Amino acid sequence: MRALTHNKKTFIYFAIALMAVLVVYSLAFKPALDRINTLKRVIPEKRQTLEQLQQKTEQYIQLKAAIGQIDQNTSGDAEAMQILSSIENLASRTGLGSRMTVTKRSQSHANGEYTRG
């Protein structure tokens, strides 16, 4: 076998070094760069989604509190309305309905008074 010249040895070493650099790049650096680019795109989308969820959560809490307030305000009214309804039904069955005036709730919910209607 013939001995390789200095130029051919240099070329072979250079080719081996180039192949090693390409392998390291394709196995380590390229996936890392791809992941960084993906994260640069995905993180702002996820932050926007998080902000939307936080806004929806705040709206939910406010609505839940409003529903609780409505339930609290109307819990006493249900009993009063049942009593009035029972009285009106009794009056119509006994024939007293024509001589009885109907009570209706006033517009002001703050004082709880009834007016004759």
Image (cartoon, rainbow, N blue to C red):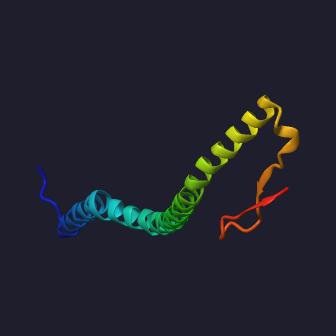
User: Which residue is rendered at x = 49% and y = 69% of the image?
Assistant: 44
User: Which residue is rendered at x = 47% and y = 68% of the image?
Assistant: 47
Nearest the eye: 49 or 56: 56
Does 47 sit above or below residue 31? Answer: below
Nearest the eye: 83 or 18: 83
User: Which residue is rendered at x = 78% and y = 52% of the image?
Assistant: 103
Question: Which quadrant of the view contains residue 56?
Answer: bottom right
Task: Determine whether, in the image, residue 64 is placed left or right of residue 7.
Answer: right
Does 104 sit above or below residue 83? Answer: below
Task: Determine whether, in the image, residue 8 is placed left or right of residue 30.
Answer: left
Question: Which quadrant of the view contains residue 23?
Answer: bottom left
User: Which residue is rendered at x = 88% and y = 40% of the image?
Assistant: 98
- Relative image position of residue 34 (x, y in whole percent): 40, 62
Nearest the eye: 75 or 94: 94
- Relative image position of residue 113 (x, y in whole percent): 70, 64
- Relative image position of residue 25 (x, y in whole percent): 30, 63
Task: Determine whether, in the image, residue 68 is placed left or right of residue 21.
Answer: right
- Relative image position of residue 61 (x, y in whole percent): 49, 63
Nearest the eye: 51 or 88: 88
